[in-house]
Image (cartoon, coloured by chain):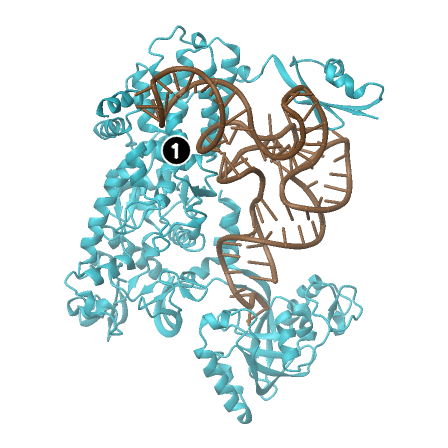
Amino acid sequence: MQESKVQEDAQHYPHEQVEKKWRAYWQDHQLHKPDLDNPGDKLYTLVMFSYPSGDKLHCGHWYNFGPTDTWARYHRLQGKDVFEPMGFDAFGLPAENYAIQHGIHPHESTQANINYMRKQLREIGAMYDWRNEVDTSDPEYYQWTQWIFLQLYHMGLAYKKKSPVNWCPSCETVLANEQVIDGKCERCDTPVVKKNLEQWFFKITEYAEELLEGLDRIDWPEKTKAMQRHWIGKSVGAEILFPLAANEEQTIRAFTTRPDTIFGATYMVLAPEHPLVEDITTEEQQDLVRDYVEKADKTSDIERLAEDREKTGVFTGAYAINPFTEEKIPIWIADYVLYTYGTGAIMAVPAHDERDYEFAQTYQLSIREVISPDGESHGTDQCYTDYGMLLNSGEYSGMASQEAIKRIAEDCEARDIGRASVQYRLRDWLISRQRYWGAPIPIVYCDKCGTVPVPEDHLPVELPRDLDLRNTRGTGVAPLGHSDEFVNTSCPECGGTARREIDTMDTFVDSSWYFLRYVDAHYADGPWNPNRVSTWLPVDQYVGGAEHATMHLLYARFVIKALHDKGLLDFDEPFTRLVHQGVITKDGAKMSKSRGNTVSPDEFIEQYGSDIFRMYLMFMGPYEEGGDWSDKGIVGIDRFVNRIWRLVQSFSEFTKETCEDDTLLHIMHSTIKQVREDTESFKFNTALSRIMEYVNTLYKADETEIARENLETLVLLLAPFAPHFTEELWEMLGHSPSIFEQRIPEYAEQYLQRSTVDMVVQVNGKVRDTFDIAADSSEEEIKQAAMSLEKIQNYIDGKDVVKTIVIPGRLINLVVK
RNA sequence: GGGCGGGUGGCGGAAUUGGCAGACGCGCUAGAUUUAGGAUCUAGUUCCCGUAAGGGAGUGGGGGUUCAAGUCCCCCCUCGCCCACCA
């Protein structure tokens, strides 16, 4: 048994020993460490850094990191100075929750996890530059996260305000809009409730327009750009003032994208939270209105979001004046109007808005048609929401919608009853978190001086270490509030007693600038090394999950734009090119512990090695779509690798240095071309299949024709995919390491052309035969050759060839009658 | 409800953008090798009829444009993701 195992191993590629050998070599020779101060042709390749959870690296990590390293290595083989850093997004709730459960300090558990993950990350065999590892929970790092907060504060982009915010009762913290999914906490799925709290925000809304505009300048997936555009949600329209009938001095501001429908505004609706509600409600309606407001307040987002929910509302008893028709129109309140969007009040045009139509029907409000396709009346049995021609609209009747929109907005402005206006769906970024494991917000409250920013030279505001987090839960006070040592401080301005802000920052603040830190992760004189940042940034290629489309990827763009406006950066888009890796599923479902369908990479790496594991991930399917994991599929890659292993072993001596066989040359050069194109564009699956075809060709070729050149080309093309394996093969071929000091082969146009081509003959569009012909044959020669084929004769005999289509080098189609 | 993607053999997936559908891999079948198994090599493998030669059908369904459609156009079914009362 043991003996046969040894024999077997002699045939089989010894992955374990080879991978160990080359990882040690790379490390000893400092191989993948670019000169960061004076790079040649630089390439900054970045993957989204990972959260150091207690788990091992999972398939998702591998799928993000392995193929990206392949892409980076491919560019290394083109002579680029590739910078590929790695670090840890180490702050966050899971570490804190784990700490509470197990009584371990989050710092301890996080460091333990980082140590473990770092070891695993080395097994990938990627070109990570560990000199510049980043740990966002290290004061060395987070002092600069706090510094960035201060920059935004001084720019007026960080402010505190009291407003209804999303509160997760289970996590005991507020959440940003982006972190609420279907009314539930993104992390724990607990329904989110509204709380009126004073919180810190970043004024991302001030950058709405720039964030939209910048999308046109970056090479990102269209889908992601569309998501960001939609999230920002720009609407162009007008704000129109509606005077109250009871007191014409007082007005209600309504935003509309359809000022052309103003003559059809037969009632108004305020959001229940609207401050005017209390003022205008008449005595008779007061009880009804109060009940409704109270009920709306209690209604959770989930209920409000419920599908086909009937529209409800109540009449306030008050009336407004439509400034164009001069009619008195009733003012209602209803929760289908959102206080957080636009002005929190709408002019309702039931004839031309589905929601208003539904509401008007329920409450018997009048519906007036003011737009139709042709300007003729078609009645109000249906709601017509398209643009068209105005009717029943006074002097504007007969005008086209687009024209009327402009004119009415202008006229509003002239009459001082409104103006053209743009609204965005985007809300300011709520960055306060009532949790411990994050960067403290560097603010101090002084009775005399008020809100005072911590001076830059007092940073970092360090987290207190001696806090037992278990005693802070459920107290209604954020954890840092339980540390007197932390809270009590002196005012940086007057020196008097003061209290520190006890909230910490959203971890998305940490990750909104880490890629600046990477180029000199231990730089002491500032958040980043300015020379290196201007050399290396922006990131040339960013790779990460699509789930960050409207979170991390939006926040990072905002922070960079703000820092750019402050004159601190000479670029304003952080990621020039972006690719999302797909999701690896198991049995069609997303892998998760709760489903019990996770695949542990470790098991497969032990059996096959990391090269084979990463290659299988790449071979499974298109990188941006992911694929379904199959335990069996990986053996195909294992066989492929061993076929190459035996091939190279059997050619210790070559009869030829360079290839002389025409067919082999042609195949080799077209393989080079296709593999290069596919690897460059993240089509790893087809790149690998091209290499497999090439290997199959070599197996079938006359072995005296196989030259050293053929095998070296194979090994070089494969190198980005299987770095350890190909280093070994390169050495077996008599070269000194490292293969990554080599250049990827170039293809020569002359070998892509062939002297004869295979042509298909179709008769009436159906394939009937094929034949070989000289590549430079004329159409007439091709036609003659095709028609003289015996099989073709049978089809055209006695018939007229009415048309002939020749696609040179591909096919000829004979149309017969 | 809106926006964006998809639907191709037993399976994962390929198809110079309109030009031989099913590359490559898994699985399966047969043969070689082997004491046997495994491994390896060779051949085959969309489906239907046929021993074969050959013929027919075929990319979710239906219609269309074209010499030629997986690819373009129209209608429908279906799955996935994102946003969901955004005025």
Taking A110 as reference, is A771 above or below it? above
Residue at the image position 39 percent from the left and 53 percent from the top:
A552
- For the N terminus of chain A, give its image quadrant: top left
State whether residue A78 appears in this view: no
Q: How many marks?
A: 1
Q: Is residue A501 left or right of residue A806?
A: left
Q: Residues within 10 Å of mark 1 (few under 14, many from 20)?
A: many
Residue A182 at x, y = what percent? Answer: 46, 64
Along the viewing direction, whichever of A265 and A312 lies nearer the viewer: A312
Residue A327 quadrant: bottom right
Q: Chain of mark 1?
A: A
State whether residue A152 appears in this view: yes
Residue A791 at x, y = what percent? Answer: 73, 17
Residue A299 at x, y = what percent? Answer: 46, 76
Residue A801 quadrant: top right
The residue pinned by badge 1 equals: A615
**Visual hue assigned to chain B:** brown
Secondary structure at badge 1 equals helix
Q: Inspect the image, locate mark 1, and give the three-letter code of the amino acid beneath it.
A: Met
- For the C terminus of chain A, give its image quadrant: top right
Taking A98 as reference, is A625 above or below it? above
Residue A343 at x, y = what percent? Answer: 53, 72
**Visual hue assigned to chain A:** cyan
Q: Is residue A548 left or right of residue A326?
A: left
